[in-house]
Amino acid sequence: MRIDVHFTDRVGIAQEILAALASRALSVSAVEVEPPHIYIEAPALDADQFAVLRAELMGVAGVRSVADLEMLPGVRRRLYLDALMTSQADPVLAVDGRGVVVLANAAAVAVCGIPEAELAGRSLRDLTGDAALVEALVAQGARLPVSEVQIGGQRFLMESVALHDAAGSVAGALLTLHAPQRLGERISALQNHGAGGFEAILGQSPAIRTLKQRAMRMAQVDAPLMIRGETGTGKELVAQACHAGSPRRDQPFFALNCAALPESLAESELFGYASGAFTGALRGGRPGLLELTDGGTLFLDEVGEMSPYLQAKLLRFLNDGSFRRVGGERDIKVNVRIISATHRALEDMVVSGAFRQDLLFRLDVLQLNLPPLRERTEDILPLAQVFLERACAQIGRPKVRLSRAAREALVANPWHGNVRQLQNVVFRAVTLSDAAVIDVAALELAGADVTAVPQSAAEVGTLEAAVAAFERDLLQRLLPEYPSTRKLAERLGTSHSAIATRLRRHGLS
């Protein structure tokens, strides 16, 4: 039986309580003193003996109550601590102030490949082979920034939390080891929360129904997939749907826009880097998207913008599934499905030498072609209605509707920016208009080209106005294909500043 004696703290009271048990020749197997309580475990004590003992203990000066216990508090804490450590999927090590392992959970034991009884007492230096790590851990009071370590032949990102004794001094550290794939699963879950499958691809036109049927079949095939389509047609949405419909659906999904980063950043983002690869690199290195995506799907958007050097590195990975980090010396092998997308004619880029033909063959095993919005006009109004409801909900205003003229203008518009442009037009119209009915004027304020037919000679105003209208229409049509002032200036043979001025003048971005 286990008992809890609640007392008023005074010198010698614990000895008097234990003496009462000794006088009855009761064997005591455990004692925990946490004033104002003393917890005692006496295996031979039965209910009848406890009633007599309780009366005797209540006669000791300062004893306030005596009750039986189901479990000693210390045993309960150890039980819950063991359960907590066992439930942790990530390896966890508790080390003392010298970097010696005191405690390890089951995941850490499995990673180290050492029996639990032998793991306790081993130095962190022996496990990692990194003497500088232990020295830094001790020198910095167990407050290390997240760094990469290698244990049991595997790489982990190590997170440390200092442990303090009652006096406030550092007594050790709790080290949590995060495998890149586990981190990838968590980051992907946060980034893609709410991302749908094929149901998120809106539209009921024959072109969209055919696309969905084809994509559903290709989602099940574990081979590289190339998605082609104009800017704004929803290539990433289709890639996410293919991932959600594939056997890899429970694994990470990451996306990298190859046109958004310079070569050096894109390389480290994709392949990661080793310790000391460049100035400012994290100690121990950092995993790239390929490691984080291990087991899942990596979407390479605008793959046609990838530099020749990165094309060669990607080709090597597609050949055997291995790569090296920037500045690294060893090969890393992962299992990742590549889905790529482009709005450019890669075959023409191959002819001009801007894109590798062998890489194109590797990426273009399966292919999906996304139809532009102007080729599925029956989807324009249903899409606009969905975007209208979302916009109202997002800005917290009552539902609005489109006028007949606005609906006709939306259907007549060429939509060079496709679905993305339609969504932006509707959102801006809802934001700028206070009316319950969105009319053509609100769409014009939103920057949409809503001219259904060319203007007649009688409708043309001044020459200056006509030139400005032509200039604005030209810029709006070219922006989707040349989405930066630099690229647009090169296309039109003028300066970057001149293009920026004209874009501002016409309210384009």
Image: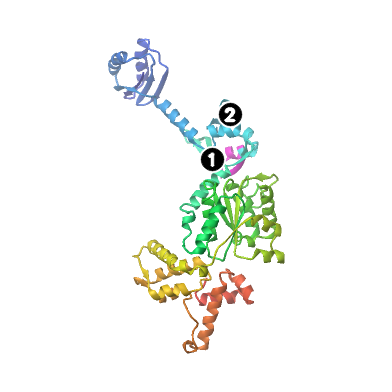
Residue 273 shows up from this direction: yes
Stretch of the chain drawn in magenta = 134-149
Where on the picture, by quarter, is residue 396?
A: bottom left
Give the residue at x 46% y 70%. Answer: 425
Q: Is residue 125 magenta?
A: no
Q: What's the coloring here?
A: rainbow
Point out which mark residue 119 bears.
2
Q: Position of residue 184 (x, y in %)?
A: 55, 47
Q: Secondary structure at mark 1?
A: strand
Q: Is residue 136 magenta?
A: yes
Give the residue at x 53% y 54%. Answer: 216
Q: Decide which of 134, 129 is in the foreground and name it.
A: 129
What amino acid type is highlighted by mark number 1? Answer: Ser
In this view, 284 is above or below 436: above
Quadrant of the rendering where the N terminus is positioned:
top left
Q: Earlier in the sequence, mark 1 or mark 2?
A: 2
Task: Please give the count of numbered marks on the rendered protein.
Answer: 2
Label 2 crowd bin: few (<14), some (14–19), many (20+), radius 10 Å? many
Point out which mark residue 66 bears.
none
Q: Position of residue 2 (x, y in %)?
A: 36, 20
Where on the picture, by quarter, is residue 371?
A: bottom right
Q: Decide which of 72, 257 is in the foreground and name it.
A: 257
What amino acid type is highlighted by mark number 2? Answer: Leu
Q: Nearer the viewer, mark 1 or mark 2?
A: 2
Point out which mark residue 160 bears.
1
In this view, 215 is above or below 13: below
The residues tagged by marks 1 and 2 sit, at their Cα atoms, a distance apart of 19 Å
Residue 237 shows up from this direction: no
Q: Secondary structure at mark 2?
A: helix
Q: Position of residue 110 (x, y in %)?
A: 57, 32
